[in-house]
Image (cartoon, rainbow, N blue to C red):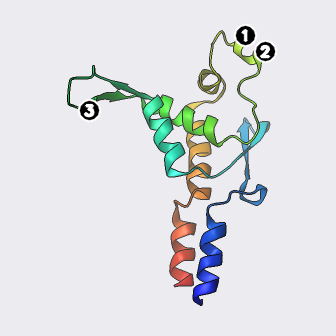
Amino acid sequence: MNERDILSALLSAGEVTQEDYEPVSIVRRGKKVMEFKVRPLSDEESQRCWKAATRYGPAQAGRPRTALETNTALYRSHLILAASVDDIWSSPELLQKYEVLQAVDVIDKVLRVGEKQRVIRKIDEISGFGDNALAETAKNS
Protein backbone atom coordinates (compact mmCIF):
# COMPACT_ATOMS: atom_id res chain seq x y z
CA MET A 1 0.00 0.00 0.00
CA ASN A 2 1.22 3.47 -0.77
CA GLU A 3 0.81 6.42 1.57
CA ARG A 4 -2.38 7.64 -0.14
CA ASP A 5 -3.99 4.18 0.17
CA ILE A 6 -3.06 4.01 3.84
CA LEU A 7 -4.49 7.50 4.47
CA SER A 8 -7.70 6.58 2.67
CA ALA A 9 -8.00 3.37 4.70
CA LEU A 10 -7.46 5.26 7.96
CA LEU A 11 -10.08 7.86 7.04
CA SER A 12 -12.73 5.20 6.47
CA ALA A 13 -11.64 2.75 9.21
CA GLY A 14 -13.57 4.51 11.98
CA GLU A 15 -16.89 4.45 10.15
CA VAL A 16 -19.44 1.81 11.05
CA THR A 17 -21.85 1.05 8.23
CA GLN A 18 -24.75 -1.34 7.78
CA GLU A 19 -22.28 -3.75 6.19
CA ASP A 20 -20.69 -4.10 9.64
CA TYR A 21 -23.98 -5.21 11.25
CA GLU A 22 -24.34 -8.91 12.02
CA PRO A 23 -27.52 -10.83 12.82
CA VAL A 24 -27.71 -12.82 16.04
CA SER A 25 -30.30 -15.56 16.43
CA ILE A 26 -31.59 -16.81 19.76
CA VAL A 27 -32.54 -20.46 19.37
CA ARG A 28 -34.22 -22.51 22.08
CA ARG A 29 -35.05 -26.20 21.69
CA GLY A 30 -34.26 -25.98 17.99
CA LYS A 31 -36.67 -23.10 17.36
CA LYS A 32 -35.62 -19.53 16.57
CA VAL A 33 -37.10 -17.34 19.28
CA MET A 34 -35.78 -14.02 18.00
CA GLU A 35 -33.19 -12.40 15.81
CA PHE A 36 -31.63 -8.97 16.08
CA LYS A 37 -28.60 -7.18 14.68
CA VAL A 38 -25.51 -6.05 16.52
CA ARG A 39 -22.73 -3.71 15.46
CA PRO A 40 -19.07 -3.34 16.42
CA LEU A 41 -18.26 -1.31 19.53
CA SER A 42 -15.48 1.20 20.06
CA ASP A 43 -13.15 1.27 23.05
CA GLU A 44 -15.00 4.32 24.32
CA GLU A 45 -18.38 2.55 24.18
CA SER A 46 -16.98 -0.52 25.91
CA GLN A 47 -15.47 1.68 28.63
CA ARG A 48 -18.84 3.42 29.19
CA CYS A 49 -20.47 0.00 29.59
CA TRP A 50 -17.79 -1.02 32.09
CA LYS A 51 -18.28 2.16 34.12
CA ALA A 52 -22.06 1.69 34.14
CA ALA A 53 -21.60 -1.77 35.67
CA THR A 54 -19.01 -0.69 38.27
CA ARG A 55 -19.68 0.44 41.82
CA TYR A 56 -17.28 3.09 43.06
CA GLY A 57 -16.21 4.13 46.53
CA PRO A 58 -16.72 7.67 47.79
CA ALA A 59 -14.54 10.38 46.30
CA GLN A 60 -11.69 11.60 48.49
CA ALA A 61 -10.07 14.99 48.14
CA GLY A 62 -7.22 14.90 45.63
CA ARG A 63 -7.73 11.24 44.74
CA PRO A 64 -9.67 9.53 41.99
CA ARG A 65 -12.66 7.41 42.95
CA THR A 66 -11.79 3.79 43.56
CA ALA A 67 -13.64 1.04 41.74
CA LEU A 68 -14.98 -1.37 44.35
CA GLU A 69 -16.78 -3.97 42.27
CA THR A 70 -17.82 -4.59 38.68
CA ASN A 71 -20.93 -6.64 38.00
CA THR A 72 -19.84 -8.65 34.96
CA ALA A 73 -23.37 -9.81 34.13
CA LEU A 74 -24.54 -6.20 34.07
CA TYR A 75 -21.47 -5.23 32.01
CA ARG A 76 -22.35 -7.85 29.40
CA SER A 77 -25.96 -6.62 29.31
CA HIS A 78 -24.74 -3.06 28.76
CA LEU A 79 -22.52 -4.27 25.90
CA ILE A 80 -25.49 -6.00 24.25
CA LEU A 81 -27.64 -2.90 24.69
CA ALA A 82 -24.95 -0.63 23.23
CA ALA A 83 -24.29 -2.94 20.27
CA SER A 84 -27.94 -3.62 19.39
CA VAL A 85 -28.73 -1.83 16.14
CA ASP A 86 -32.46 -1.48 16.68
CA ASP A 87 -34.03 -0.13 19.85
CA ILE A 88 -35.65 -3.45 20.75
CA TRP A 89 -34.96 -3.54 24.48
CA SER A 90 -36.66 -0.33 25.65
CA SER A 91 -40.22 -1.00 24.56
CA PRO A 92 -42.65 0.25 27.21
CA GLU A 93 -44.47 -3.09 26.91
CA LEU A 94 -41.30 -5.01 27.78
CA LEU A 95 -40.42 -2.69 30.65
CA GLN A 96 -43.91 -3.14 32.08
CA LYS A 97 -44.09 -6.91 31.50
CA TYR A 98 -40.76 -7.55 33.23
CA GLU A 99 -41.37 -4.85 35.86
CA VAL A 100 -38.08 -3.07 35.22
CA LEU A 101 -37.20 0.56 34.63
CA GLN A 102 -34.30 0.27 32.19
CA ALA A 103 -33.72 -1.47 28.87
CA VAL A 104 -30.54 -3.07 30.20
CA ASP A 105 -32.63 -4.95 32.77
CA VAL A 106 -34.89 -6.35 30.02
CA ILE A 107 -31.83 -8.08 28.54
CA ASP A 108 -31.27 -9.91 31.82
CA LYS A 109 -34.91 -10.98 31.93
CA VAL A 110 -35.10 -12.15 28.31
CA LEU A 111 -31.70 -13.67 27.51
CA ARG A 112 -30.25 -16.67 29.28
CA VAL A 113 -26.60 -16.62 30.37
CA GLY A 114 -25.39 -18.79 27.48
CA GLU A 115 -27.36 -16.74 24.98
CA LYS A 116 -25.80 -13.56 26.32
CA GLN A 117 -22.37 -15.17 25.96
CA ARG A 118 -23.02 -16.05 22.31
CA VAL A 119 -24.18 -12.48 21.58
CA ILE A 120 -21.05 -11.10 23.29
CA ARG A 121 -18.86 -13.44 21.20
CA LYS A 122 -20.47 -12.06 18.04
CA ILE A 123 -19.96 -8.46 19.23
CA ASP A 124 -16.32 -9.24 20.06
CA GLU A 125 -15.81 -10.88 16.68
CA ILE A 126 -17.13 -7.94 14.66
CA SER A 127 -15.33 -5.47 16.95
CA GLY A 128 -11.99 -6.95 15.94
CA PHE A 129 -11.40 -9.64 18.56
CA GLY A 130 -11.30 -13.31 17.77
CA ASP A 131 -9.39 -15.74 15.62
CA ASN A 132 -10.70 -14.45 12.28
CA ALA A 133 -9.45 -10.90 12.88
CA LEU A 134 -6.02 -12.16 13.87
CA ALA A 135 -5.82 -14.50 10.90
CA GLU A 136 -6.82 -11.73 8.48
CA THR A 137 -4.22 -9.39 9.96
CA ALA A 138 -1.50 -12.00 9.66
CA LYS A 139 -2.58 -12.94 6.13
CA ASN A 140 -2.53 -9.30 4.97
CA SER A 141 0.88 -8.52 6.48
Mark 1 neighbour density, 10 Å: few (under 14) some (14–19) many (20 or more): few
The residue sitting at the front extreme is 62
**Residue that appears at 45% across and 29% down:** 53
Say which of 99 and 116 sits in front. Answer: 99
**Mark 3 to mark 1 CA distance (whole Å):** 38 Å
Q: Residue at x 57, y 83 (%)?
A: 140
State the quadrant of the N terminus: bottom right
Residue 17: image location, x then y, percent: 74, 57
**In this image, 83 relative to 128: left or right?**
right
- The percent position of residue 57, horizontal first and vertical second, equals 28, 22
- The residue singled out by tag 3 in the image is 64
| Nearer-N-terminus badge (3/1) | 3
Q: Secondary structure at mark 3?
A: loop
Closer to the observer: label 3 or label 1? 3
* Residue 114 seen: no
Marks 1 & 2, CB-CB < 8 Å contact: yes
Label 2 close to label 3 by CB (< 8 Å):
no
Q: What residue is disc 1 on?
A: 96
- Type of amino acid under label 3: Pro
Instruction: Identify the residue at image location x=52%, y=59%.
Output: 129
Q: In this rendered view, identify the residue nearer to me: 53 or 32.
A: 53
Helix, strand or loop at mark 1: helix
Classify residue 119 as left or right of residue 89: left
In this view, the residue in front, 46 or 109, is 46
Q: Residues within 10 Å of mark 3 (few under 14, many from 20)?
A: few
Is residue 1 depicted above or below 74 in this figure? below
Q: Which residue is mark 2?
A: 93
Say what amino acid the circle numbered 2 marks. Glu
Using a 10 Å C-alpha cutoff, classify the residue at mark 2 as few (fewer than 14 neighbours), some (14 to 19) or many (20 or more).
Answer: few
